[in-house]
Amino acid sequence: MKISTKGHYGVQAMFDLAQHYGQGPISLKSIAERQSLSEHYLEQLIAGLRKAGLVKSVRGAQGGYILARDPDDIKVGDIVRVLEGPIAPVECVNDDDPEQCMKSEFCITRNVWEKVKESIEEVLDSISLADMCRDAERAKMNRDFYMYYI
Amino acid sequence: MKISTKGHYGVQAMFDLAQHYGQGPISLKSIAERQSLSEHYLEQLIAGLRKAGLVKSVRGAQGGYILARDPDDIKVGDIVRVLEGPIAPVECVNDDDPEQCMKSEFCITRNVWEKVKESIEEVLDSISLADMCRDAERAKMNRDFYMYYI
DNA sequence: GTTAATCCCTACTATTTTACTTGGTATTAT
DNA sequence: ATAATACCAAGTAAAATAGTAGGGATTAAC
């Protein structure tokens, strides 16, 4: 019941881009450093995100990546689906899969996985990168407040 | 974002046991046949469930397995945790893990996975084997009703 | 007390996935 | 011209997955 490092790192990288949104292209190198990730590995992940239209790239020196849409308009679910494939705890609740299980209409265990799927999607599609930036701001303020009074 | 066949098949097998609860020990062979699973592979899964105290075994001819507790008292989450390990989309939200991420208190992406984790647990811990049996009954009645009127 | 049905246990294995690394080429600001 | 970047293809070690193989121990039924 795990996601792979692709989804994990990918969300970190996109969050990093969101935190620097409006500051021009952000290089992979700087993202990799801030998030302590392998730059070359990130490269592969962001290639997928670019092909999916979630980020735009700027080539050449001082180039980098920019979110293709407003942080409010990119949900964590969008990122996870690109990097991990369809959100479906078992294959038989994957709507994109052509060969569905025969018994799907009668299958009771399938109902369980369907509910799990829906609950995951509800969470991931309700959180935008902008939400995460707001959380980060709040966390920073709390930290500053705490530091001040100690 | 998948569970493995262990969790998948394991829930099927336990559901099968629940549907035959009160009928004495149920053999792996019959479960494997009804659910179209490899008997030998099931054996490995149910060994874990037995060690975890979710089923009891009866050895010898006419032996088999029986739920160790009432179907109302076994949640799908119990089964999944035994067969898949702790429910945690990424390691850093696994409470059982001794080596947690340093930045966990400040980490914003971690909050996302924490929410995913909670929502999965909420679903899996809210569904008992008895619930599934009731669903199966309802589905059967609907099917019979439909057949009658066609 | 023999037999057949069952659970129990250990080990092996082919395939796939994961998490990268290596080693380049193409593009562009300075 | 140079250095900083994005872009691309291939290789790889380790782990996980989804089983299989083969046999031993226990017990109901005859």
Image (cartoon, coloured by chain):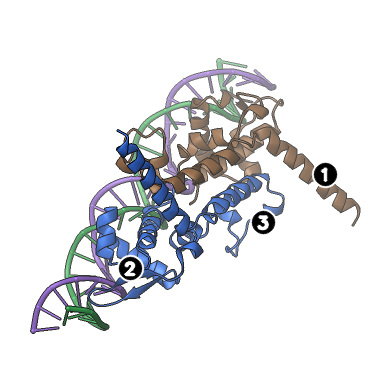
Chain colours: A blue, B brown, C green, D purple
Query: Vertical placement of A131 versus B111: above or below?
Result: below
Q: Secondary structure at mark 1?
A: helix
Check disc 1 and give the amino acid type.
Answer: Met
Q: Residue at x 58, y 48 (%)?
A: A119
Using the rendered view, name the quadrant where residue B23 is placed.
top right
| Closer to us: A123 or B1 | A123
Residue at figure coordinates x 54%, y 56% from the top left: A125
SS state under label 2: loop
Tag 2 and tag 3, C-beta contact below 8 Å: no
Q: CA distance from mark 2 to mark 3?
A: 52 Å
Residue hosting label 3? A102
Q: In this figure, which residue is indicated by the disc labeled 1?
A: B141
Q: Give the quadrant of residue A71.
A: bottom left
Q: Position of residue B143 (x, y in %)?
A: 81, 49
**Considering depth in this image, is A140 or A48 the residue closer to the camera?**
A140
- The amino acid type, in three-letter code, at marker 3 is Met
- Which residue is depicted at the point 73% across and 41% down? B135
Q: Residue furthest front?
A: A149
Check contact, mark 2 vs mark 1: CB within 8 A.
Answer: no
Residue A23 is tagged as: 2
B145 displayed left or right of A125: right
Is residue B75 shown left or right of residue A53? Answer: right
Q: What is the CA distance from the residue labelled 3 to the residue labelled 1? A: 20 Å
> What residue appears at the point 63 percent right and 38 percent down from the top-left corner?
B31
Q: Chain of mark 1?
A: B
Residue D17 picture location, percent across and down? 44, 48
Badge 2: chain ID: A
Examine the image and state in which quarter residue A93 appears: bottom right
Q: Quadrant of the C terminus of chain B?
A: bottom right
Whether callout 3 and callout 1 share a subunit is answered: no
Q: Are marks 2 and 1 on the same chain?
A: no
